[in-house]
Amino acid sequence: MINEKILLSIETSCDETAAAVVGESYKVYSSVVASQIAIHAKWGGVVPGIACKQHVTAINGVVSEALNTAGISQKEIEAVAVTAGPGLPGCLAVGISAAKAFALGWEKPLVAVNHLEGHIFSAELDGAKIEFPAVYLLVSGGHCMLIYAAERGKYKLLGTTRDDSVGEAYDKVARELGFQYPGGPVIDRLAAVGKETYSFPRPIIKDGYDFSFSGLKSAVRRQIEKGDIVKEDIAASFVAACMEVLTVKLKKAVKEYGPKSAIIVGGVSKSPVLRALLSDGSLGKTEVVFPSLKYSTDNAAMIGAAGWWRFTNNGASSETVGIMPRLSLSRS
């Protein structure tokens, strides 16, 4: 039995069709994700048009499964939260359209949510309590940024990538090694048994809080083109370079801003290397928080948590709200 207010949340910003039922306490009562990985693998990456069509096909079934798994009906829903951006325009449009239809048909408020803020809230889905001020490292296939939050909901972007995100670099290196999309998990598996025998650059590691991974990716490609390589060692050396850049930048932010919490979110936060490097007490009194592995990649539960915070503090969104493919945190 559910003894708190609940909302339905929907996420379709890229290639995952997801829906969840989330309580006001951020407790997750159901989280359903219909993955398109197998469909896009043969293309080596997400094809927007195909992703959009798959969302259209899957959205109603995913929402029904989320409600059924939670054991509730639409009458018990307080609001409908949905990702409005950033993301692929056509994919976002499917989610927004569906959420508006449900909200209108059920006579419930609509809450537009920033996908990036959803990742920020993902670390709290298992009951973790974040103390502020906080520094967030958001690392995924599409994003790589450092964020300072003096208090909940107040974000200052410290740095972002000048080119590739770290997750994108993972996928491209995997492709150079002959592996299919998505390459991140493959690279991590190879790195776990490889040795750091290749010397790869750490781009702009001492240059502020911005990131750059294109030079690192190019260095890896040149090494592969020379031939006679050990794939496991290439992966281990590449991962070591990525993780050193990420941890050095994060530690610099912690030293400068003195946060109570350092939260690492996004798909790359699943990296066992990154988790090991930041769980060694090197951040001193700053508490290190990671989301559960199941909430690290795109999901609707994180959109539900962020949706609750926005709904409680800002109320419902306009029924005319549209997609915002380039939405930034400053506009959350």
Image (spheres, rainbow, N blue to C red):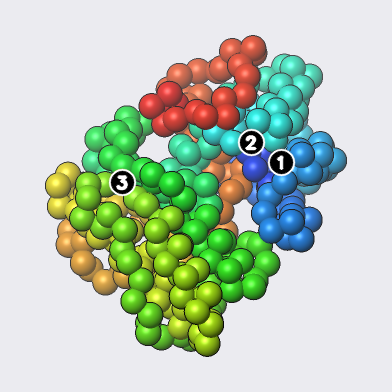
> Mark 1: which amino acid?
Pro
Q: Residues within 10 Å of mark 3 (few under 14, many from 20)?
A: many
Is 256 left, or right, of 321 in this rendering?
A: left
Q: Which mark is residue 260?
A: none
Which is more toward the observer, 183 or 69?
183
Label whose residue precedes the other's in the sequence (2 or 3): 2
Q: Residues within 10 Å of mark 2 (few under 14, many from 20)?
A: many
Q: Secondary structure at mark 2?
A: loop
Label whose residue precedes the other's in the sequence (2 or 1): 1
Cα separation between marks 2 and 1: 7 Å
Say above or below: 41 vs 13. below
Q: Residues within 10 Å of mark 1 (few under 14, many from 20)?
A: some
Which is more toward the observer, 319 or 242?
242
Verify CB contact (< 8 Å) between mark 2 and mark 3. Answer: no
Which is more toward the observer, 257 or 68?
257
> Mark 2: which amino acid?
Leu
Q: Secondary structure at mark 3?
A: loop
Q: How many numbered marks, from 0 up?
A: 3
Query: Residue at the front extreme?
Result: 226
Label whose residue precedes the other's in the sequence (3 or 1): 1
Say above or below: 183 vs 22. below
Q: Which residue is mark 2?
A: 88
Q: Position of residue 131 (x, y in %)?
A: 28, 45
Q: Which mark is residue 210?
A: 3
Q: Which residue is mark 1?
A: 48
> Mark 3: which amino acid?
Asp
Q: Is residue 195 visible?
A: yes
Q: Position of residue 284 (x, y in %)?
A: 17, 62
Cα separation between marks 2 and 3: 24 Å
The image quarter in which residue 40 lies? bottom right
Q: Is residue 137 visible?
A: no
